[in-house]
Amino acid sequence: MREDVEALDISDVTGNWVDAKILASTIDARIKALADLSDTPLFFGRLDYEHAPGVELAEGAQGESFYIGRRHVHDAEGEPMVIDWRAPVSQPFYRASRAEPMDVLLRRRFGYTGGELTAYEDEHLTDPGESETASKLLQTEIERPRVGPMRDIVATIQPEQDEIVRAGVTGTVCVQGAPGTGKTAVGLHRVAYLLYAHRERLARTGTLVIGPNASFLRYIEQVLPALGELHVKQATVDDLVAHVPVRGADPADAARIKGDARMAEVLRRAVRSGIRMPTEGVVVVRGSRRWRVPAYELEEIVREMAERDIRYGAAHDALPQRIAHAVLVQMERAGEAPDDRVQDAVARNTAVKAAVKQCWPPVDPAKLVLRLLSEPEFLAQAAEGILDAQEQQTILWAKPARGLASAKWSAADAVLVDEARDLVQRTPSLGHVVLDEAQDLSPMQYRAVGRRCSTGSATVLGDIAQGTTPWSTASWAEALRHLGKPGSRVEELTRGFRVPREVIAYASRLLPEIAPDLAPATSVREAGGDFAVRPVGAGELTAAVVAACEEALAHEGSIGLIAADPDVAALGAALDAAGLAYLAPGEETSAQARLTLVPASLAKGLEYDYVVLAEPAAIVAAEPDRRTGLRRLYVTLTRAVSGLTVLHAQELPAALAG
Ligand SMILES: Nc1ncnc2c1ncn2[C@@H]1O[C@H](COP(=O)(O)OP(=O)(O)OP(=O)(O)O)[C@@H](O)[C@H]1O
């Protein structure tokens, strides 16, 4: 630890010897407190304000400088030495510009190599003689090889990203962004920011990051801890709704209907289908007396419950008390003075219980969905006027399940069970939910996420062009409606930080076919990147792929070999035969193990310094329809940071040929 600090050269950044000593000792103490971040620099920026913040209107106010870092650091007297990047005072570090200097005279960015301070960059924002230049430190940061899990971008958050990161906690924000525009990074930094700005509230209500699959979650799991936030839950949508074991898969047409928002009404009707208006009254015997609640009064109670906007289960639990209350009114009329204990006892009376069971039977959500998908008559009754006969037929299980244990639940069925559960009992809401790769969710999945932030807010991140499910989002306005956050603001990010210019231009040729309304991303990367599209002879593809991997391994950084899912096993065998060790997606790359074999279906959200892409036509063909295939291809083409080699023995899709 001490060595880490000794390695920090702070002579450049401190005015005198005493300052240097104080800063060094404070940093030392802080590093000890933050043992898990031993080679993470504690500050990466400095702001010199013209006036101390808060006193800018006072006459003769002095300027003040601040170091900006990942955490707040103060000296022995409690004086701040390094200000947390999330504090209001730090905001101009990300937002100040020559047009709007925000009272900042100097912005200094520090560059580090392995924890050692190696460079700095100054901007005098009010100096008219100084011209705007691109930040070399940002360039270095985005060129840095990508071995290991995803990193934070706290030192180089861009103004358009910062606006999203610091958006208020009460509003939901949706971000449409082309590949590599930093959506995931922005979402994670936003959670860290919100936890700083509203710690108490969010510590109580909780925060959750939702990603597309387990390997993606493993890839991003280090970012929040590196920002000091250890208590953010991460899950896939499937994890959230795992009330039943998923053992089956739906054909696309069945999954599409099951994911359609109309299913919410079908389920609502199914849940309430057991409500019966009483035909007889209830007779409660207490001691020598009998109290009778007549059928019409009971019916009034049940009707009122059915009309109230409360959960089915809450109404079920409230009914005995309501009936007991009716009994108590009679007792009072008869001159008795019953207290609360009497009311509770009446509510527990077997006759009351029996009446409730008859009028308002308890509902087991999983059993209810099982019935719905197994019994044509029950489905027909609940779906009448909502799903046509063909649609009903499509979602019925081919083999009706005998019981919960043997049911072959699909992922879409689990979402239905979740919806049914929520109809019975309200799902607790978190304070904030970040939903990444949102474009792939079905309306019913949006609803499942939406109930987990019904009293909180959400950050919805996605790219319509990367939607690869049959039900993927066509419009963010509609998605936000399903989420229960209609009319939320939608931002667009178009500056790409990952993909080299030539590569993004090539991939963007697919946009007219896959998402005609979207503009292609630009690339902020200055390096052109290595980019090659190589035709190979039939029968030579595997050998060419192995050779391309070997070539890529000669470079620094991570390598991803991406291929159509059905081709992965054979390519794995070929890599084995060639003695090339490889990982599966989500397994952490290291200097020793840098090659990952990635099935195209798992490539979303991931990135590699060099990508070898095997047979685009096979990636397209592996999907149920051409548009989904081309979108999958678009995803795989946009994973590369420094180089992309496309190898093909078959013809390329027309937009990419020539
Ligand atoms: N401001 C930034 N400074 C440095 N690097 C950045 C910045 N913004 C994004 N990046 C880097 O660009 C890469 C892409 O970011 P990220 O994965 O968040 O993009 P995305 O929009 O989620 O991409 P995709 O749509 O492909 O999932 C990451 O390596 C990220 O660290």
Image (cartoon, helix red, strand yellow):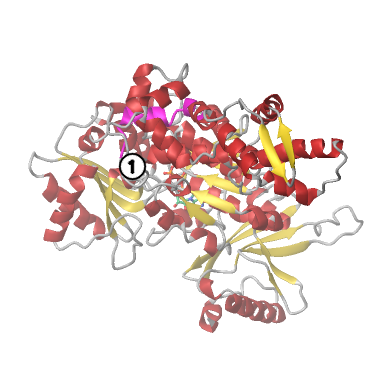
Residue found 7% across the figure and 42% down from its top: 539
The image quarter in which residue 278 lies: top right
Does the magenta run of residues contain 251?
yes
Q: Indicate the position of residue 430 as horizontal and vertical percent values.
A: 61, 49
Residue found 45% across the figure and 56% down from its top: 220
Residue found 46% across the figure and 70% down from its top: 114
**Image check: 300 left or right of 229?**
right
Which of the pair 532/14 is nearer the observer?
Answer: 532
Region rendered in magenta: 249-264
Q: Indicate the position of residue 300 as horizontal and vertical percent values.
A: 70, 26
Which of the pair 332/229 is nearer the observer?
Answer: 332
Q: Indicate the position of residue 309 as horizontal and vertical percent values.
A: 66, 32
Which of the pair 483/531 is nearer the observer?
Answer: 483
Count of number-bearing discs: 1
Q: Indicate the position of residue 88 as horizontal and vertical percent values.
A: 72, 54
The image quarter in which residue 289 lies: top right
**Image check: 538 left or right of 622?**
left
Which of the pair 620/300 is nearer the observer?
Answer: 300
Q: Residue furthest front?
A: 288
Could one spot residue 584 in this view of the protein? Answer: yes
Q: With respect to residue 246, does 297 lie above or below?
A: above
Does the magenta run of residues contain 565?
no
Q: Residue furthest right?
A: 59
Could one spot residue 178 in this view of the protein? Answer: no
Report the residue marked by disc 1.
407
Amino acid under disc 1: Ala
> What's the magenta bit mostly, secondary-structure-wise?
helix
**Image check: 76 left or right of 504?**
right
